[in-house]
Every structure is written in C-alpha cells, then in structure tokens.
Amino acid sequence: MASVTSLSDSVQQHLATALSATLPEAAGADPLLRRSDRADFQANGVMALAKKAKANPRELATRVVAEVATGDVIKDVEVSGPGFLNITITDAAIIRNLAARHADDTGRLGVPHAGQPGTTVVDYAQPNVAKEMHVGHLRSAVIGDSVVKLLEFTGENVVRRHHIGDWGTQFGMLIQYLDEHPHELDHKSGEVSGEEAMSNLDRLYKSARKLFDSDEEFKTRARRRVVDLQAGDPHTLATWQKFVDESKIYFYSVFEKLDMEISDPDIVGESGYNDMLAETCRLLEESGVAVRSEGALCVFFDDIKGPDGNPVPLIVQKSDGGYGYAATDLSAIRDRVFRLKATSLIYVVDARQSLHFKMVFETARRAGWLNEDVHAHQLAFGTVLGKDGKPFKTREGETVRLVDLLDEAIDRATAVVREKDVRHQLSEGEITERGAQVGIGAVKYADLSTSANRDYKFDLDQMVSLNGDTSVYLQYAYARIQSILRKAGEARPAAHPELDLHEAERALGLHADAFAAAVAEAAGEYAPHRMTAYLYQLASLFTSFYDKCPVLGADTPEQVANRLFLCDVTARTLHQGMALLGIRTPERL
Ligand code: ARG
C-alpha cells in the first residue's frame, strides 16, 4: 500500500518551492511550518531568511505569497504580523487525504516506512530472578514495549532483550543458603503456581540476605559459591537453574496479566554473557582502557568522583576474580554490536542507574565498540510515587508488589465498566474481560503519558477516571464511535470531498491527518508520551465534533456518509495509536 503524503508535508513542499523561486539562495531552507489557531498552518521561516538577505520581512513574505500555488491543496495564504504566512487548506484536500488513509487496508493509515531502517536493540522488562517484581519493573516493561512497537511500526528492525538479573553475588548467597537448608524450597503439595513459587523464593531470598548480612563466614562461603557458578560447576548450576525456572513461570504470569507478549528467546539474562566476561576483561586490559588497581580491574573517569574527591572507578573485575554487573553489560554491548549488528542500543532502565550506564557507555566508546555509527542511549525513567509524593511503599514501608497493584487496578476498572453499563448490555464474562482491558490500559497509559524521565504519582482514582487525559476516556471515545457505526449499519462509509466542512470537522480531519508525524516524533524521540498527547487531542477533537455536528441526523445522506467516514477514520487512528501503546480498544464498553 502506497504511503500518503500528509497535508502538512504537501504545504511544506509548496512553500519550499515558493521560497526558492522568490529567493534562489533560500533553496532548501525550512519554512518552519506548524499547526496554528489563526489559520490551519503558520510558517515562520521567512523572517530568518529576510534577516539573512537584509530584506524587509513583510515585503519578502508578500513576494513569497505571490509564488505559492493555490488551488487543490492550499485555499489561501496571507501575510500576517511581522512576516508570518497563514495558510488555509481546502476542505476537499482534507477529506481526500483522509480517504487515501482510510483506503489503506494494512491498518497503517498511509504512514510511510522509514527510508533506511537500522537495527535497534531494546533492553527492557528485566526483572530479577528469585525476587518479586515491583513498580520499577512495570515502568521498564510498559515503556519498553511501547518503544518496541513504535519503532517496529516505522520499519526499524528491533531486537528485544530482557536482561534479567539471573547472575552475580546474590546467587552465590541463594545457592549456598539452599544447600545449607535443603528443605526450604520443598513444596507441601505437588503442584505450585508461579505465584506461590515466587512467594517461596522471596521468603528464601530474605532469609538468605539476613544471614549474608549478619554472618561473615556465610558471606565468605557465598562469595566462593559465585566463583563456582561462574566457573560452571555442575551442582551449583543445577541449583541455580531451579531458581531461574521457577522465576520464569512467575514472570510470564505477570506479563500475561500486563497483556504483554514476551518470548523466551528474547530473555537473555546476565548469565547469557558468562562466556564472554573473561575476554571482555582481556580486551579492556590489553587496550589500556581498564587498569589493575588494588587487584581489581578498573576504568577511571576524570569527571566521576566520590564525595571524598577521589575518582570512582567502574569495576569490571573484582579482586577476588568475580565479575559484576558492569562486565556483563559491557559483554552484552559487544554481543549486540558485533553479533546482532545493532546500530542503536536502547536501555529502558531506572534513572537511578544513570551513573552505571554513563560509565559503561564511555568505557565501550574508549574500547571502540560504540562510535558515531553505533550509539547507546539510556531511556531513563523516574520513580513511581505514592499519593503522598514519596516513593511508592505499602503502609508497612515495604515495596509494593506489582501483581497486587495490577489486581487493584483491574478491580477498580471492572467496577467502572459495570457502573457504566446501565442498560445491562454486557454479560458477566464481558464485564470481566473489559475490566481487565480498561484496568491494565489505565495503568499503562498513566505510565506512558508523562515523559519517562519524570516521576509520577500512582493514583488509581485518577487513572480510571472517565474525564481527562486517561486511557478510559480514549477507550470510551473509540467504543462510542463503534456504536454509532453499528447503528448506521454501513460497512465502509464513503467520503464526500465535494462538501463544505464545519470548523469542528476541519479540526478533527487535520489532526487525524497528522498521525504519521506523531508516530515519527514518538518513535524518533523514544517518547510514547508524544503518542498519548496526540491521541488525547484526537479524542477531544472528536468529542467537540460530535457535540457540534449531528452524524446520523445530518442534513443530507452525503453529509451523513461523510461524517460517518470521519468517525471511522478517527476510530481507526485511535485503535492503531493505542495498539502502539500496548492498550486495547474494546468494541463495546
Ligand atoms: N535487572 C535490573 C534491575 O532490576 C535491570 C537491568 C537493566 N538492564 C541492563 N542491561 N543492565 O534493576
């Protein structure tokens, strides 16, 4: 299916042509076009050009206007203020453009693929083995999943990596503890659910931690066990595998609740790079990027110092020979760059790990693994706060379990769905299904709609509210359109470009036509909140269109059809946009 040129791009081209016709040295200059309240679009670029050419800006603008071809697309262009160009689009062009998008049966709405796709590895949804998942893991999963979908939609090759914490010191501790207390993981009955197993693992983790922190001899035995693990001792590995297998069952159950597809080959945890660790260290040491300091292999940075003013190094190998988080991440970079041929590496990780990534990326750059052609970026996210504005904790001061949070969101959303269904049109099964879709959608949307680097308050009342910038509002807008279309009984409403449009129709139509730009912006900046903002605006414009323009009660059959067509384009755009956020749009609510 051919991609559709947006009206904004057509206008941009028209203006660029007019600019270079007026001022040959302006060829290739950006007319700086944007949507405007005054007209449909406004261009500010003439002023800068006038300054450069030492011309009067209003005069230059007037000459440019004379060169702009009006007719099919541009109805009118005029000079305003100090030299702005105000551009009005023809009604027919709006409908024709949307008709071309509507005709795209792939669901892409005419959005073009990127010219030269690269390969991006997205590191996201990385919980830790033998530990409960918490709200931080929620953010990484939700943001990462949307970034993956946005990038794939633009045509980028995406490799997903779930860098789960399945290696390191804590496993020495766990394995040693389980060996010394062999019955602690015995199950009373035969079968255990993922969640039960997780609770057991969590309890075991806490006991092991307590002993590790209080008993120096145990600490030494546990540390030795890490080295056994890294050396591949079979008995140690077998105990380790038990922890991993049990944990994966739990992870999958949470991801399923989150309505998120995670596939096994993409789970390449820290352990997956074990065979590369020694070589990574050798390469860094031989090239002089890392140096031995008090037995440890370290990388130093001029600008990274501790509170005492002494440099804080990145420790690649500890003095006891053990490898840590940094060695694994550096090995993962080598794997992603040289084997997976990545051109971009994205890490969706808590902002509190920013220093780690700064040091890891700089080390990789010094080693030549990252360069102008391959860059790495931490998509750092902020903290989830409770209603009191402090990091989200239970009343007892413990970390909130992700599952409990999701269950509560689903309960609240189910109540909303039930309450809205005044005429009892939904079956009990439908209410449960919609409740989950609305509840999970609400959690995802709240997380995605503020820019990732900011903290946000986890406020379920606000999240499941029908009014305001929430997924529920968007889902209801979508369901309402579907109900209108069902009532009309038309499979594919026809566009009528010959009709005059109401202001509200124009505003809705122009915004719907800008979907491709919203996708490009959200994907290019790894910023799902750009997509939520676009969709919220779309739903708001739809609401005001629906208030002002009767659809089924419009004056003529052509106008009914054209308005149904606008409804359908809006619905398809909402559906596709929400899908890029990982949020469902139920047909009925
Ligand atoms: N498992 C880590 C955590 O829970 C996040 C891993 C991030 N990814 C990475 N390549 N280091 O904090």
Image (cartoon, rainbow, N blue to C red):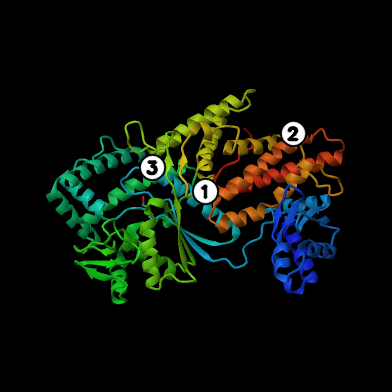
Q: Which residue is mark 1?
A: 451
Name the residue tied to disc 2. Answer: 547
Q: Which residue is mark 3?
A: 134
From the viewer's perspective, is the residue at label 2 or at label 1 nearer?
1
Whether ligand 1 has any atom under 8 Å from the Cβ at mark 1 is answered as no
Camera-side residue of 262 and 323: 323
* Marks 1 and 3, how far apart at CA: 20 Å
The amino acid beneath tag 1 is Ser
Q: State the quadrant of the C terminus.
A: top right
With 90 as the anchor, is 195 left or right in this view?
Answer: left
Sort mark 3 into few (<14), some (14-19) or many (20+) by Cα contacts within 10 Å: some
Q: Can you see residue 498? A: yes
Q: Position of residue 174 (x, y in %)?
A: 23, 48
**217 over 371 or under it: above or below:** above
Instruction: Report the residue at 56% width, 30% height from top.
Output: 431
Relative horizontal placement of residue 459, taking residue 291 as reference (left or right): right
Q: Nearer the viewer, residue 494 or 280?
A: 280
Mark 2: C-beta under 8 Å from nearest atom of ligand 1? no
Element class at badge 1: loop
Residue type at mark 2 is Asp
